[in-house]
Image (spheres, rainbow, N blue to C red):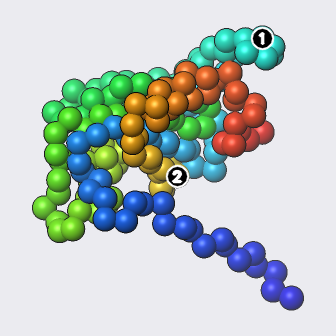
Amino acid sequence: MDNEKELPQRKPTRLRDFDYSSTGAYFITICTENRRQILSQIVGVDVPDDPKNVVLLPCGKIADKYINQLSEFYDNIKVDRYVIMPNHIHIIVFVLENGASRTSPPTRQHSVISRFVSTFKRFVNKECGKNIWQRYFNDHIIRNRDDYEEHIRYIHENPMRWYYDELYAEE
Protein backbone atom coordinates (compact mmCIF):
# COMPACT_ATOMS: atom_id res chain seq x y z
CA MET A 1 0.00 0.00 0.00
CA ASP A 2 1.34 3.40 -0.97
CA ASN A 3 1.77 5.65 2.09
CA GLU A 4 1.83 8.89 0.12
CA LYS A 5 -1.43 10.72 -0.31
CA GLU A 6 -2.38 11.48 -3.85
CA LEU A 7 -3.06 15.19 -4.19
CA PRO A 8 -6.38 16.12 -5.76
CA GLN A 9 -6.22 17.47 -9.29
CA ARG A 10 -6.89 21.20 -9.44
CA LYS A 11 -9.83 22.14 -11.59
CA PRO A 12 -9.30 25.14 -13.84
CA THR A 13 -11.11 28.08 -12.27
CA ARG A 14 -10.61 30.50 -15.13
CA LEU A 15 -13.34 31.38 -17.59
CA ARG A 16 -12.27 30.11 -20.97
CA ASP A 17 -11.42 32.92 -23.42
CA PHE A 18 -12.02 35.68 -20.85
CA ASP A 19 -9.67 38.68 -20.88
CA TYR A 20 -8.65 39.01 -17.22
CA SER A 21 -7.44 42.54 -17.88
CA SER A 22 -10.78 43.82 -19.10
CA THR A 23 -12.79 46.55 -17.39
CA GLY A 24 -15.04 45.23 -14.64
CA ALA A 25 -15.32 44.19 -11.01
CA TYR A 26 -13.45 41.26 -9.48
CA PHE A 27 -13.78 39.54 -6.10
CA ILE A 28 -10.35 38.34 -4.92
CA THR A 29 -9.47 36.02 -2.03
CA ILE A 30 -5.85 35.81 -0.86
CA CYS A 31 -5.00 33.25 1.85
CA THR A 32 -2.08 32.99 4.22
CA GLU A 33 0.28 30.06 3.89
CA ASN A 34 -1.02 27.02 5.80
CA ARG A 35 -4.00 29.13 6.90
CA ARG A 36 -1.95 30.74 9.66
CA GLN A 37 -4.06 33.23 11.60
CA ILE A 38 -1.59 36.11 11.49
CA LEU A 39 -3.63 38.93 9.94
CA SER A 40 -6.38 39.67 12.46
CA GLN A 41 -8.51 38.45 15.32
CA ILE A 42 -12.30 38.37 15.33
CA VAL A 43 -13.67 39.63 18.64
CA GLY A 44 -17.17 40.14 19.96
CA VAL A 45 -19.98 38.37 21.72
CA ASP A 46 -20.80 34.92 20.33
CA VAL A 47 -24.44 35.60 19.65
CA PRO A 48 -25.92 34.80 16.23
CA ASP A 49 -26.06 37.90 14.00
CA ASP A 50 -24.15 39.95 16.60
CA PRO A 51 -21.60 42.28 14.98
CA LYS A 52 -18.03 41.13 15.31
CA ASN A 53 -15.01 43.37 15.19
CA VAL A 54 -11.86 42.73 13.20
CA VAL A 55 -8.74 43.64 15.18
CA LEU A 56 -5.70 43.80 12.93
CA LEU A 57 -2.47 42.11 13.98
CA PRO A 58 0.91 43.52 12.81
CA CYS A 59 0.91 41.75 9.41
CA GLY A 60 -2.77 42.65 8.98
CA LYS A 61 -1.95 46.32 9.55
CA ILE A 62 0.75 46.07 6.89
CA ALA A 63 -1.70 44.39 4.50
CA ASP A 64 -4.28 47.11 5.18
CA LYS A 65 -1.71 49.80 4.39
CA TYR A 66 -0.78 48.23 1.04
CA ILE A 67 -4.36 47.52 0.00
CA ASN A 68 -5.01 51.25 0.32
CA GLN A 69 -1.73 52.33 -1.28
CA LEU A 70 -1.94 50.00 -4.28
CA SER A 71 -5.16 51.52 -5.53
CA GLU A 72 -3.25 54.82 -5.63
CA PHE A 73 -0.28 53.16 -7.36
CA TYR A 74 -2.38 51.61 -10.16
CA ASP A 75 -4.21 54.21 -12.25
CA ASN A 76 -6.70 51.66 -13.58
CA ILE A 77 -7.56 49.85 -10.32
CA LYS A 78 -9.86 51.00 -7.55
CA VAL A 79 -10.27 48.99 -4.34
CA ASP A 80 -13.98 49.07 -3.56
CA ARG A 81 -14.43 46.94 -0.41
CA TYR A 82 -12.31 44.52 1.57
CA VAL A 83 -12.08 42.63 4.82
CA ILE A 84 -8.95 41.30 6.48
CA MET A 85 -9.82 38.04 8.20
CA PRO A 86 -7.43 36.06 10.45
CA ASN A 87 -6.03 33.94 7.61
CA HIS A 88 -7.35 35.47 4.40
CA ILE A 89 -8.39 38.69 2.72
CA HIS A 90 -11.40 39.35 0.49
CA ILE A 91 -11.16 42.35 -1.84
CA ILE A 92 -13.49 43.74 -4.49
CA VAL A 93 -11.54 45.69 -7.08
CA PHE A 94 -12.65 47.57 -10.16
CA VAL A 95 -10.50 47.59 -13.27
CA LEU A 96 -11.43 51.03 -14.58
CA GLU A 97 -9.90 50.79 -18.03
CA ASN A 98 -8.51 47.98 -20.07
CA GLY A 99 -5.24 46.83 -18.52
CA ALA A 100 -4.53 44.32 -21.29
CA SER A 101 -1.14 42.72 -21.36
CA ARG A 102 1.21 42.56 -24.32
CA THR A 103 0.66 38.82 -24.67
CA SER A 104 -1.95 37.36 -26.93
CA PRO A 105 -4.32 35.88 -25.94
CA PRO A 106 -4.60 37.52 -22.50
CA THR A 107 -3.95 35.17 -19.60
CA ARG A 108 -4.58 35.40 -15.89
CA GLN A 109 -0.83 35.44 -15.22
CA HIS A 110 -0.40 38.64 -17.21
CA SER A 111 -3.59 40.39 -16.14
CA VAL A 112 -3.77 43.60 -14.18
CA ILE A 113 -5.44 41.63 -11.34
CA SER A 114 -2.48 39.21 -11.15
CA ARG A 115 -0.01 42.09 -11.15
CA PHE A 116 -2.01 43.82 -8.39
CA VAL A 117 -2.03 40.67 -6.21
CA SER A 118 1.63 39.88 -6.91
CA THR A 119 2.75 43.41 -6.04
CA PHE A 120 0.58 43.42 -2.91
CA LYS A 121 2.00 40.09 -1.70
CA ARG A 122 5.59 41.16 -2.40
CA PHE A 123 5.26 44.46 -0.49
CA VAL A 124 3.54 42.82 2.50
CA ASN A 125 6.06 39.95 2.62
CA LYS A 126 8.98 42.37 2.55
CA GLU A 127 7.64 44.44 5.44
CA CYS A 128 6.56 41.36 7.47
CA GLY A 129 10.05 39.91 6.95
CA LYS A 130 8.89 36.58 5.49
CA ASN A 131 6.52 35.01 3.02
CA ILE A 132 3.09 34.86 4.62
CA TRP A 133 0.93 34.01 1.57
CA GLN A 134 -0.02 30.81 -0.17
CA ARG A 135 1.09 30.67 -3.76
CA TYR A 136 -2.26 31.01 -5.49
CA PHE A 137 -5.22 33.32 -5.08
CA ASN A 138 -8.85 32.97 -6.06
CA ASP A 139 -10.81 35.41 -8.14
CA HIS A 140 -14.38 35.73 -9.29
CA ILE A 141 -15.56 37.97 -12.10
CA ILE A 142 -18.53 39.95 -10.83
CA ARG A 143 -21.11 39.58 -13.57
CA ASN A 144 -23.95 41.93 -12.63
CA ARG A 145 -25.44 44.16 -9.93
CA ASP A 146 -26.94 41.26 -7.92
CA ASP A 147 -23.60 39.42 -7.96
CA TYR A 148 -21.85 42.61 -6.81
CA GLU A 149 -24.30 43.17 -3.95
CA GLU A 150 -23.99 39.53 -2.88
CA HIS A 151 -20.20 39.88 -2.62
CA ILE A 152 -20.47 43.18 -0.71
CA ARG A 153 -22.80 41.43 1.75
CA TYR A 154 -20.36 38.51 1.98
CA ILE A 155 -17.47 40.85 2.86
CA HIS A 156 -19.59 42.70 5.41
CA GLU A 157 -20.89 39.53 7.09
CA ASN A 158 -17.68 37.47 6.91
CA PRO A 159 -16.46 38.43 10.42
CA MET A 160 -19.85 37.43 11.89
CA ARG A 161 -19.57 34.00 10.26
CA TRP A 162 -15.87 33.43 10.98
CA TYR A 163 -16.29 30.23 12.99
CA TYR A 164 -18.43 28.75 10.20
CA ASP A 165 -16.18 29.95 7.38
CA GLU A 166 -14.66 27.35 5.05
CA LEU A 167 -11.26 29.00 5.64
CA TYR A 168 -11.59 28.82 9.43
CA ALA A 169 -8.86 26.74 11.01
CA GLU A 170 -8.11 26.04 14.66
CA GLU A 171 -4.66 27.19 15.69
Q: Is residue 96 left or right of residue 58?
A: left
Q: Which mark is residue 96?
A: none
Q: Residue at x 73, y 15 (%)?
A: 49
Q: Nearer the viewer, residue 63 or 148?
A: 148
Indicate whether 95 appears above or below 34. Answer: above
Q: Nearer the viewer, residue 150 or 66?
A: 150
Q: Quadrant of residue 160?
A: top right
Q: Quadrant of residue 169?
A: top right
Q: Position of residue 71 (x, y in %)?
A: 26, 29
Q: Residues within 10 Å of mark 2 (few under 14, many from 20)?
A: some
Residue occupied by mark 1: 45
Residue 79 seen from this side: yes
Residue occupied by mark 2: 134
Look at the image and tell me in which quarter the C terminus lies: top right
Q: Secondary structure at mark 1?
A: loop
Indicate whether 6 appears above or below 33. Answer: below
Q: Amino acid at mark 2?
A: Gln
Most extreme residue toward the left, as rendered? 102
Q: Nearer the viewer, residue 161 or 7?
A: 161
Q: Position of residue 59 (x, y in %)?
A: 50, 30
Look at the image and tell me in which quarter the N terminus lies: bottom right
Most extreme residue toward the bottom, as rendered? 1
Q: Residue at x 56, y 44 (%)?
A: 32
Compute the Cα span from label 1 to label 2.
31 Å
Residue 44 seen from this side: no
Q: Position of residue 166 (x, y in %)?
A: 69, 43
